[in-house]
Image (spheres, grey):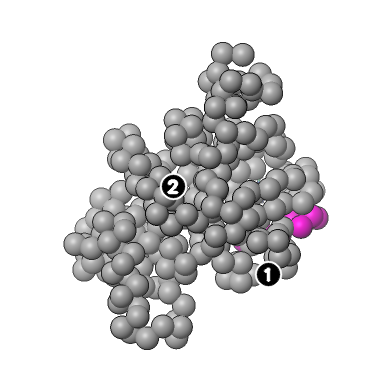
Amino acid sequence: MASVELNKINKTFGGVEVIPGVDLRIEDGEFVVFVGPSGCGKSTLLRLIAGLEDPTSGDILIDNDLVTDLSPKERGVGMVFQSYALYPHMSVYENIAFGLKLGKANKHKVREWVEKTAEVLQLDKLMNRKPRELSGGQRQRVAIGRAMAREPKIMLFDEPLSNLDASLRVQMRTEIAKLHDRLKSTMIYVTHDQVEAMTLADKIVVLNRGKVEQVGTPYELYETPASLFVAGFIGSPK
Ligand code: ADP
Ligand code: MG
């Protein structure tokens, strides 16, 4: 578990300011959801936290330590993307085990760890299957397992369910909520699905053109939206 802090984070791409200076603190173990229209900078913010992008200026702290100059590996962050990016020639077991730091654990330890993870994600009966033999939801669970394999202090999700059909999305949403209850790790989750945001979040961050419009619990945002923009996004009657 770890807190995340963004201090005056600014990001420009080719002279265009995409993130104009964001301050944000996420507490240990919180489930935080980023929402906002397409192109508002949600993925960029996640990638900055993961270390896949460098900020133009500003600092990022994880667990109160400065990580701005650390590589993704050194940050203790696991990321799950919209497209699953599994290795097609590897089994479920191998895909999950691949995330484990090589050399860190012996074979026996690896097996123990992968089996435990597969059980949490209900993949234990599918260990020998290849990705093409899995449903969309099962594949996404393997991707989550692989992100978990590094035992990240923080898990980042970028619209992980948007490629799934509606019923599977509801099922996976419940599974992700259970995963958070069990692991108690800090999770930052991007979605444009209002229901997903309202049901999963401890705290919702509403973004508009790279700026934080409002931060609050789902209840706070619904009851007292700070602007028409927030009200429109959350669906409250202001
Ligand atoms: P969201 O995830 O909210 O849809 P993004 O973070 O992907 O938004 O993008 C925010 C803005 O930054 C968009 O205008 C996008 O075109 C731009 N952008 C993102 N990544 C790059 C990049 N690597 N190079 C240039 N522009 C980018
Ligand atoms: Mg995005």
How many residues crowd mark 2 within 10 Å: few (<14), some (14–19), many (20+)?
A: many
Residue 56 drawn in magenta? yes
Mark before the other along the chain sequence, 2 or 1: 1
Q: Amino acid at mark 2?
A: Pro
Residue drawn at 31 percent across, 75 percent down: 112
Query: From which residue to which does the magenta span run?
Result: 52-59
Dot 2: what SS?
loop
Q: Nearer the viewer, residue 66 or 190?
A: 66
Q: Position of residue 119 (x, y in %)?
A: 27, 61
Mark sitting on residue 176 = none
From the viewer's perspective, is 60 left or right of 113? Answer: right
Number of numbered callouts drawn: 2
Q: Where does the N terminus fall, quadrant-wise? A: bottom right
Is residue 152 visible in the rendered image? The answer is yes
Residue ranking furthest to the left = 125
Q: Residue furthest top?
A: 237
Q: Which residue is mark 2?
A: 160
Which quarter of the frame holds ligand 1?
top right
Q: Is residue 23 left or right of residue 217?
A: right
Residue drawn at x 60%, y 27% is: 220
Q: Which residue, given by chain and number where applicable, does mark 1 sit on? A: 70
Local crowd at mark 1 within 10 Å, few (<14), some, or many (≥20)? few
In the image, 154: left or right of 225? Answer: left
Residue at horizontal 61 percent and vertical 13 percent from the top? 238
Where residue 88 sits, quadrant-wise, is bottom left
* Relative to 118, residue 30 above or below: above
The amino acid beneath tag 1 is: Leu
Residue 176: % across, % down: 39, 47
Q: Residue 73: horizontal and vertical position, in percent?
A: 57, 70
